[in-house]
Image (spheres, helix red, strand yellow):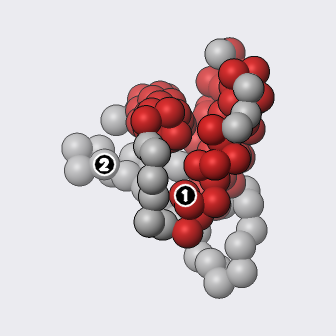
Amino acid sequence: MKPEQLVEILNRDVIEGNLDLYRNLLETTNQATDPVWKGILPMYINLTKSEREIFLRFLKIVEINTLSHVLGILDGTTYVDGIDEDLILTTNNDNKKINVYLQDLFLALIEKK
């Protein structure tokens, strides 16, 4: 697997897939037992259509920033306390390290969209 493929898959499944899931849950759920969902549902329901879209765009920004941060950690370009060694991400078919520019590739992909 090439780094570009991994980034495309992560964007599709983590960013777009989760955003679709959240949108669907927010649009179709009437009651919740989870305290966070109990709090957010009434707020979301009272938003206008425009405000809902803004809220979902904000969720997307949070998702993008989170995934970008994780990719930076995997690449070794983002420091986190407790990880003092280089991380090496490979596939079974190829021992070539693919986590060198994942964060850059991901952010470039996001900018294209």
Label 1 is placed on what type of residue?
A: Trp
Where does label 2 land, which residue? 91
Q: What x and y, as percent, mark residue 70?
A: 61, 56
Count of numbered marks: 2
Where does label 1 land, which residue? 37
Q: Which numbered mark, 2 or 1, is in the foreground of this view?
A: 1
Dot placed on the residue nearer the N-terminal end, 2 or 1: 1
Query: Which element is circle 1 on?
Result: helix
| Rendered image quadrant of residue 29 | top left
Label 2 is placed on what type of residue?
A: Thr
The quadrant in which the C terminus is found is top right
Q: Please indicate, yes or no, whether residue 50 appears anywhere in the rendered image.
A: yes
Relative to 4, residue 97 above or below = below
Q: What x and y, as percent, mark residue 59?
A: 67, 41
Spot the residue most to the bottom. 82
> For the residues marked 2 and 1, what is the alpha-carbon distance in whole angstroms?
37 Å
Query: Which element is circle 2 on?
Result: loop
